[in-house]
Image (cartoon, rainbow, N blue to C red):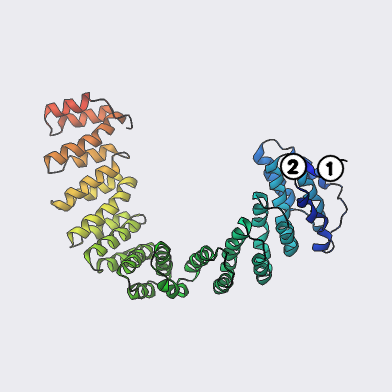
């Protein structure tokens, strides 16, 4: 007897299709005359990506009455990836029109990647239309990988609509469900959308990597909206390490909104290690907006360590985007350790973008050994890129002739 199963798929996969008229109400069993032609046309497009996109487009434009036949057509496709593309698209369309019925179709499929992909196409629509029914349906699924993925998927979807409600749903699940992972998903979404509401929840969590990540998320998102409230929350944290983590994150996020205020805030933090970290990260963000202003602020700091680390953060951005301009500002620094450090940082950051500017500035270093080492590193790149200009500069540079000849005769760096 001839089998009615296309391409060897289990009979169970076809059984739900027979029941579509029950699940979808008025879905007709008639076969639209042009549907097969539309699918055949999409399947004839040259190029795999084009075929997949076209098949997905067919699924997205279906009428409710066309869905049963579209699923039957998908079952008879020879290519697995084309079968998955059309099936998931058809089910996604069905979920727009009758999400509960589409979900039942997916749940009755055999376990595997196909079922999981189709679930991703259906569950968000189901949850959006009837979150309570979706929650009950997922909780009633058979144990397995698909159920676990469905719990995580639904937790994220529900959290976008109602994070406290999503939390209640997850905590009420029986043992055996991925409750901890689902709660983490909800917490991170809530930390982004409602950092103030999430703050007390985070503070009560046990110490660990998850709490650290949530502290960063709450502090950063809250600081961008209301820095003063975020600071008060950070300072209320009992663990010093978590408090410092939150304060540094606040300085970083605040710098995207008001960089000067964020830098001034970071400068007043204690202890010195915290102050240095916070200032550096705030100045780095400031440098991506106005590097000249950030440089000026850092150069005027009366704390030598803070100034050095802040200028390093600024120059790592400034010297790669405007090497000549940043070199000019470094030259204006007063002689001393701060200027020496800034020259070395500039050289390292700028040498592969503008080796001439980096080499010439590095030539102003005071320490002879540091000057020789830094200039050589930059000069070798300059020599490989523009031999004539590099040789002309070296001819008048203040280095021993033996050193110059060694630089000129050494083989170029293959990475230059």
> Is residue 275 rendered to the left or right of residue 185?
left
Residue 351: where, in percent of width, then height?
Answer: 28, 39
Left or right placement of residue 376 versus residue 398 in this view = right
Relative vertical location of residue 165 with respect to residue 306 in this rendering, above or below: below
Which residue is label 2 attached to? 42
Which sits earlier in the primary sequence, circle 1 or circle 2?
Answer: 1
x%, y% of residue 143? 63, 60
Instruction: Work out whether 402 lies above or below 25.
Output: above
Separation of marks 1 and 2 at Cα, in angstroms: 27 Å
Q: Secondary structure at mark 1?
A: loop
Neighbourhood count class around disc 1 (C-alpha, 10 Å): few under 14, some 14–19, many 20 upward: few
Corner quadrant of residue 145? bottom right
User: What's the mark number on residue 74?
Assistant: none
Which corner quadrant of the image does residue 386 belong to?
Answer: top left
The quarter of the picture where the N terminus appears is top right
Identify the residue shown where x is 23% and y is 25%: 410
For residue 124, what is the image quadrant? bottom right
For this rendering, which residue is in front, 331 or 243? Answer: 243
Quadrant in which the C terminus appears: top left
Pointer 2 local density, CA inside 10 Å: few below 14, some 14–19, many at least 20:
some
Q: Residue at x 23, y 38 (%)?
A: 359
Residue at (17% x, 53% y) in the render: 338
Question: As rendered, which of 265 and 59 lies closer to the eye?
Answer: 59
Q: Is residue 270 above or below residue 350?
A: below
Residue of label 1: 3
């Amino acid at each position: 007897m001839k089998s009615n199963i296309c391409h060897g798929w289990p009979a169970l996969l076809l059984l739900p299709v027979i029941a579509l008229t029950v699940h979808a109400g008025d879905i007709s069993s008639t076969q639209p005359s042009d549907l097969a032609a539309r699918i055949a046309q999409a399947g004839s497009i040259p190029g795999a990506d084009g075929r997949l996109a076209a098949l997905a487009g067919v699924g997205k434009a279906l009428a409710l009455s066309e869905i049963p036949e579209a699923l039957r057509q998908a079952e008879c496709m020879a290519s697995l990836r084309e079968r998955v593309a059309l099936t998931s698209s058809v089910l996604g369309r069905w979920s727009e029109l009758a999400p509960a019925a589409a979900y039942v179709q997916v749940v009755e499929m055999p376990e595997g990647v196909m079922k999981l992909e189709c679930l991703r196409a259906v569950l968000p629509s189901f949850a959006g239309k009837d979150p309570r029914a979706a929650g009950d349906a997922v909780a009633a699924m058979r144990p397995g990988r698909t159920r676990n993925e469905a719990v995580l998927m639904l937790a994220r979807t529900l959290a976008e609509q109602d994070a406290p409600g999503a939390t209640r749903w997850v905590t009420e699940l029986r043992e055996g469900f991925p409750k901890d992972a689902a709660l983490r998903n909800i917490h991170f979404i809530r930390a982004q959308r409602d950092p103030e509401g999430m703050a007390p929840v985070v503070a009560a969590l046990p110490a660990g990597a998850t709490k650290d990540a949530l502290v960063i998320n709450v502090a950063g998102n809250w600081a961008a909206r209301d820095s003063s409230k975020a600071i008060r929350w950070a300072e209320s944290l009992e663990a010093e390490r978590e408090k410092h983590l939150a304060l540094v994150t606040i300085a970083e996020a605040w710098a995207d909104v008001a960089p000067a205020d964020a830098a001034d805030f970071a400068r007043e933090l204690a202890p010195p290690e915290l102050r240095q970290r916070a200032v550096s990260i705030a100045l780095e963000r400031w440098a991506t907006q106005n590097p000249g202003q950030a440089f000026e602020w850092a150069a005027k700091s009366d704390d030598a360590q803070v100034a050095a680390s802040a200028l390093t953060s600024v120059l790592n951005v400034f010297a790669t985007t405007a090497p000549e301009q940043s070199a000019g500002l470094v030259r204006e620094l007063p002689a001393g350790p701060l200027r020496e450090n800034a020259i070395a940082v500039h050289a390292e950051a700028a040498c592969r973008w503008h080796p001439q500017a980096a080499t010439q500035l590095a030539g102003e270093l005071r320490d002879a050994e540091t000057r020789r080492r830094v200039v050589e590193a930059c000069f070798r790149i300059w020599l490989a890129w523009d031999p004539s200009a590099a040789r002309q500069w070296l001819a008048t540079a203040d280095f021993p002739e033996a050193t110059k000849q060694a630089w000129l005769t050494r083989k170029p760096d293959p990475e230059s």
